[in-house]
Amino acid sequence: MLSRVADNLYWLGRYLQRAENTARLINVNALLMLDLPRRVKLGWAPLIAIVGADDIFRTHYSEATEDNVVHFLATDTRYPGSISSSLLHAREILRTVRDTVPRDAWERLNDVYFYVQEHGETGVASAQRQAFLGEVITGALLLDGVLISSMSHDVGYQFLRIGSYLEQADMTTRILDVRSIDVGREQSGADLSPFENIVWMSVLRSLTAYQMYRRHMRTRVSGASVLRFLLQNRQFPRSVMFCLSSIASTLPLLPDNRKIERAIERTRALVRDANIDALVKAEGGVPRLMDEIQIGLGELHTALSDAYFQMA
């Protein structure tokens, strides 16, 4: 396979996953604001921290109000990771690789892309937001279903899934990082720790993980148990371990590369061997682990690029 096509399919997987995850983040944060007491103002700034866009956000907005953050993450094309930008990038990529994917995928992507273009500005208003974001999520899931069920599971498909899994692992660690810090911090003079379980429930919901968490963990929601489930569970598709193991399972179908294998194994070892109870008790323990995993994911991305995309 041409490295250019492999690169495009890899990024197609990342952009589609990013659009869906961003829509979920916005939706769940709005619900979290309703669940917390009025005196506890967690705010919307944590969403900017989760996506790692503080610098570009401050360039264009003076403060992290609800309207500013939602517009920035949903429809602001000046931010490359917004829903609108992600779908635009995915569409441009799919246009160039249309002969490698089912025709239905192009049609489904156009459906959600033009929906966002037509309804984006009105859809981010609080009254229409839930319905608008729901359409984005449904559209992304329909497109994912078309790709899984109708695309040949050849080398190109493997690059598509690698991109999707790497993007998901990245988002899961970002959410855990920022929310673990939020739980231990006072918000507007109010201690958030009494409402810790509400925050951790929102983490699960932002990853559509609450029902599966209840099924697997069979315990009340707590920081340690949520971290253990979202980091180390081998069966839940949005856990970091599942994503890394899924990427590893594609390697026998690709040209051998020890650098990629080592990057995956180092990062999997960080996740597998993490002492969650000790991390939760240690000050800054969870953010430090998330930073290490993020570095590992970055090294994996670089190894993939060096091995397969350099000629793109």
Image: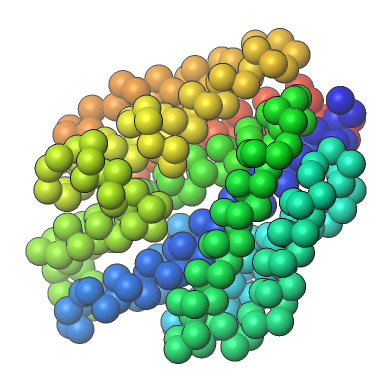
Task: Using the image as rendered, state which of residue 107 and residue 239 is in the foreground.
Answer: 107
Residue 88 visible from this viewpoint = no
Which residue appears at 34% of the width and 49% of the height?
A: 209
Pinpoint residue 84: horizontal percent, then vertical percent.
Answer: 68, 69
Residue 297 relative to residue 277: left or right: right
Question: Could you tell me residue 170's position as x and y percent?
Answer: 51, 43
**Residue 65, x across and y down, in percent:** 45, 83
In the rendered view, would you say 171 is above or below 185? above
Which one is in front, 124 or 149?
A: 149
The quarter of the picture where residue 122 lies is bottom right
Query: Please, is residue 291 above or below residue 70 in the view?
Result: above
Q: Nearer the viewer, residue 26 or 105?
A: 105
Q: Quadrant of the C terminus?
A: top right
What's the residue at 64%, 80% (across, down)? 120
Q: In this orientation, does residue 138 appear?
A: yes
Colouring scheme applied when the structure was drawn: rainbow
Question: Across the whole image, how many numbered discs are drawn on residues?
Answer: 0
